Amino acid sequence: MVDSRKYLVAFFITGLIFGTAIIASNLLGDKKVEDVRAIENRVALDILSSETQFALLAETSCRDIGPGLLSKELGPLGEKLSFAEDQTGFNNEDVDSLKRSYFLLEIKDYLLMKRLTEKCNQKTFFILYFYSTRDKCEDCEKMGYVLTALRDKYPELRVYSFDYNYDLGAISTLTSIYKVKPDLPALIINGQPYYGFKTVEELEAKVPAIKLLKTATSTATTTPDR
């Protein structure tokens, strides 16, 4: 009888622990889903905001156009995407939804800024960066850090990153227009292709657009105020 009670208590405790674990797991799962939905809602609002901004900027005066007009929209979206990709609780569909929104917003930004700078005859520098998540690409990861450092060094440089193999018609159109080969990482800098990993120093030495940026920055730094 004592043994029966002992087994019954042990069974009850085991069931309680198991049930608590299931409830906790479900709650955590629900929380992660809620986090994803919250990010997606903020992304949708960011896109709506940027689309409105695009329409306003298209009508603006050239004297009001400066570097980084839309970068504040892209930055938070990139951070949300990186956050989602780093969370094991987010499934592929969740991350896919964020990536799609981010890539589309980048393309919108790129097209608008090209149109505005041509309209205002401004010198703007664009980098389209293509990487891969399908296969292990260590050079792609290193290239991302280089481009971040380059963008920090030259704020007027606009960098747009795209997953080369991502199933999005707009990305396929970009790779077709610029004839981007699957030799990744790949950079399209002001329309010219560059393949393979490059350091900041190599880009500054070999890419005409970056060399021009470096010269302009050096001149501005060394020229004394009058």
Image (tube, rainbow, N blue to C red):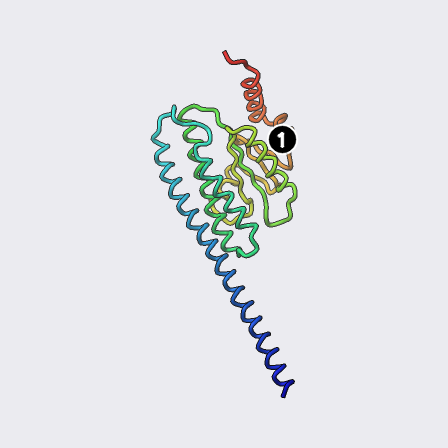
Q: Position of residue 140 (x, y in %)?
A: 62, 41
Q: Position of residue 176 (x, y in %)?
A: 51, 40
Q: Nearer the viewer, residue 82 or 59?
A: 82
Residue 81 placement, left or right of 47 = right
Query: Helix, strand, or loop for circle 1?
Result: helix
User: Is residue 200 placed above or below 103 in the rendered structure?
Assistant: above
Of 23 and 109, which appears nearest the observer? 23
Q: Residue at x 48, y 24 (%)?
A: 123
Quadrant that contains the N terminus: bottom right
Q: Residue furthest front?
A: 2
Toward which corner of the image does residue 59 lie, by quadrant? top left
Could you say which is closer to the camera, residue 47 or residue 164? 47
Q: Which residue is mark 1?
A: 200
Residue 210: image quadrant is top right
Write the residue at 58% across / 75% down: 13
Question: Is residue 47 visible to us here?
Answer: yes
